[in-house]
Image (spheres, helix red, strand yellow):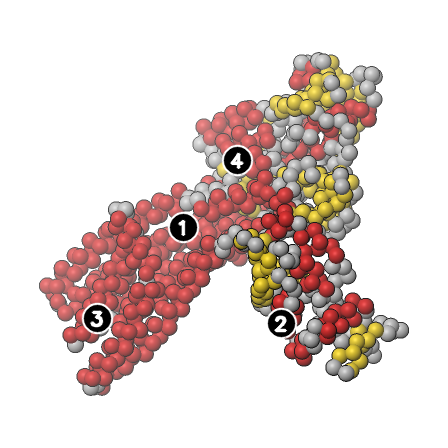
Amino acid sequence: MQEREPGLTPCFHCALPVPPGTDYAVELDGLSRAVCCPGCKAVAELIRDAGMTGYYAMREAPPPGTGRPAADAAGWETFNRDEMLASFAVREDDCAEATIYVGGMYCAACSWLVESTLDRIEGVERAEVSPITHRLRVRFRVDATGLGDILAALTELGYEPQPLLPEAGERPEVGEQRAALKRLLVASLGMMQVMMFAIGLYAGDYQGMSADMQRFLRYVSLVVTTPVVFYSARPFFVAAWRGIVSRAPGMDLPVSIAIGAAYLASVYATLTDGRAVWFDSVTMFVFFLTLGRFLEMRARHRSVDRLTALSTVLPNTAERIGAAGRETVSVSRLVAGDRVLVRTGEAVPADGIVVAGSARVDEALVTGESRPVMRTAGESVVAGSVNVGDALEMRVVATGNDTTLGAISRLSERARYARPAFVQIADRIASALVVAILVIAAGVAAAWSQIAPERAFEITLSVLVVTCPCALALATPAAFAAAGTRLAELRLLLTNGNAIEVLARAGTVLFDKTGTVTRGRPAIVRVDLEDRDFDEDYVRRVAAALETVSTHPLAQAFAIGDNPLVATDPTVDVGRGVAGTVAGRHWRLGRRDYVAGSATDLTPDEATVAWLGTGGRLVARFVLDDPLRPDAAEHVAALEALGLRTGLLSGDGDAPVARAARQLGISAFRARLRPEDKLAAIRALQGQGETVVMVGDGINDAPVLAGADASIAPAHGAMLAQLSADVILLGDSLEPVVTCLRMARRTMRIVRQNLGWAIVYNATALPLAAAGFVPPWAAAIGMSASSLIVVLNALRLARFR
């Protein structure tokens, strides 16, 4: 925000300083008002000529610069096209309705100005602005005006409009949270009011109260308690009935019996002037139960926040470069092969390859890397990253759900709906306990009906409530939800709900080499020509054409921006190389035995080698190098400090693998492994009773990632590797791997604490309640307190560092 210099006149429209020597003024209400530029002058005159000068009287004082108009409104014409209308508006016969984010709004007067201006445009039937969300919903006739005309009108007013894609519907967790909050509000208000009436009734029992007043307080309590039972407690009754129908009673059954029985008994006592009512206990039951459920739900929903952020980072439009020039299109209309211009400050709309220009790209939200990285011709860029450097051109490789961003969101969504086996076991235990509680409650009721019939009902209620296994059922899911949320904040996305429990008991961590412990950005160090019929530039271009179909990290070293050569009929032999036809010749690129059938490979100690050949003869040897991640050795040492054994499995040559293992401090390593060899190595360790975690990123790592007990794949790795992994690692460091394993151990420690507390609580509370020492209101507090303790203990994971 620009500060106003002392002594300078502020612009009447936008509040920026009027530059010295300028002479722009507008006649408004008989007074000459100074403005800073022709744009502000034009907007002010537009407002005046439209008879809406009341805008300036209604508005709050604008912050400097917020009212300055955009420089050009003509660029919105492309949004008048039918395909753009189809992307950004909902069509109904001759009318369309669109949602537009209006940037630059700062007070209610802006809402009035926008609505008044649009209402004057022919064809606009309705314009409604939310001053809180800055969203405009506009309905218009497509035969009279276009979406581009509306956007241009907003731009002329000085705002920065952005059309939004039609809403796919409210996020389900938002609706769930809103409904839960309403139920909690009703329960809390009902409890407070009924407790006030209960105090009067209790005081009347000790000091005397007329029968009419007692009857009045009971009826008022009935009126207030009824919506609490039938609205706030409805989820408990629904869940209890579902459990009965499915013959799998849950923890809601004893709670529902207690609430329903106490309410019906209180209603009967009210209508017949009985001895006691329990409306206060009923409302307390419902309030504390609802509060505990709400806190647990919030812990669970917080894990969705990062996914929501991921799903909203893509732009709505992109500037596509075609034969006829540049055009603005909806991102949903991009296809693989399109060339797109990404300007400074814009988000990359799809996964692609840079074909012209170079720029620093901020990939923080997608990869977790806080520093922008340089991307030049031939290098890949991922959807959702932001260009913070010069403009660049890219060729689209993947769009929509096929992008890295889409895959991460989809895999994380899968984890949200998965129920880990550990949680299912706890659910089954809780279900068995429910049956036991009902049997015990029936026994307590029978016993007290013989000992003291007048207390039998009250004590049975206490037993049903105080022993509800809520804490036991919440012990594991609350901890897992909190752990998942914190891991996402620490650049780790769970795709398998069972991963935490497996990672906590891991004994061995195995790493792939290329792209995992190395940077994954290899470079060609030297090209040795074996056949002098070809020159270095040509063999580089042949290799680049072949590697366009490969997702192996080494493929990046061969990328060339504008390559005239194209490989047809490409094939990938996982772990060996790629093949294809280029300029009429069939070429192979990869291991020497794959290219020429010879196993002899004179590989230098310091590098990795790839061979290129055609017709069974060797043409060139590419010497590549991929340095280790700078912190890799430090974090491997941290894993061993946790008592974990580490190893290195790679398909690379003996010398590069040995050198990497030596630098990492890893004594157990194996080289020249095919995918099936890596899987066999994992199986051998598992046969010895080891719980194995595999960290890898290549397409050749997919089988071993799936075969390991738990697996971790970097977000920049091959898509098949991510699909096989239990955890996706964001960022360019191995530190989150250490964090993940430490977090898993901490989570299971919290789970054991929660389970221990739940068992101790129920073992203590049950005999006290059965003996008649716990009144119903105290039972409600005790049961809810035990659940809250479990949830709050789980939320300690949110502070894990």
Label pair 1/2, CB-CB below 8 angstroms: no
Against 41, is 611 above or below?
above
Up/down of 772 relative to 664, above or below: below
Between the residue at mark 1 and the residue at mark 2, the CA separation in whole angstroms equals 51 Å
Give how far apart the Cα atoms at labels 4 and 1 are.
Answer: 25 Å
**Along the polypeptide, which appears first: circle 4 or circle 1?**
1
Residue 389: image location, x then y, percent: 76, 50
Residue linked to disc 1: 476
For the residues labelled 3 and 4, the Cα–Cα distance comes to: 58 Å
Q: Mark 4 or mark 1: which is in front?
A: 4
For label 3, the residue is: 267
Residue 502 placement (x, y as % from top left): 46, 40
In the depicted structure, whether residue 30 falls above or below residue 537? below
Residue 39 picture quarter:
bottom right
Q: Residue at x 64, y 73 (%)?
A: 109
Can you give x and y, in whole percent of width and height, for residue 761 in the image? 32, 58
Q: On screen, 524 above or below 436?
A: above
Q: Secondary structure at mark 3?
A: helix
User: Which residue is tagged 2?
Assistant: 112
Mark 2, mark 3: which one is toward the viewer? 2
Going by the numbered disc 3, the residue's amino acid type is Val
Q: Secondary structure at mark 4?
A: helix
Q: Nearer the viewer, mark 2 or mark 4?
A: 2
Label 2 is placed on what type of residue?
Trp
- Residue under label 4: 724
Local crowd size for mark 1, using a 10 Å CA cut-off: few (<14), some (14–19), many (≥20): many
Identity of the residue furthest to the left in this view: 450
Q: Residues within 10 Å of mark 2 (few under 14, many from 20)?
A: some
**Sequence-earlier tag: 3 or 1:** 3
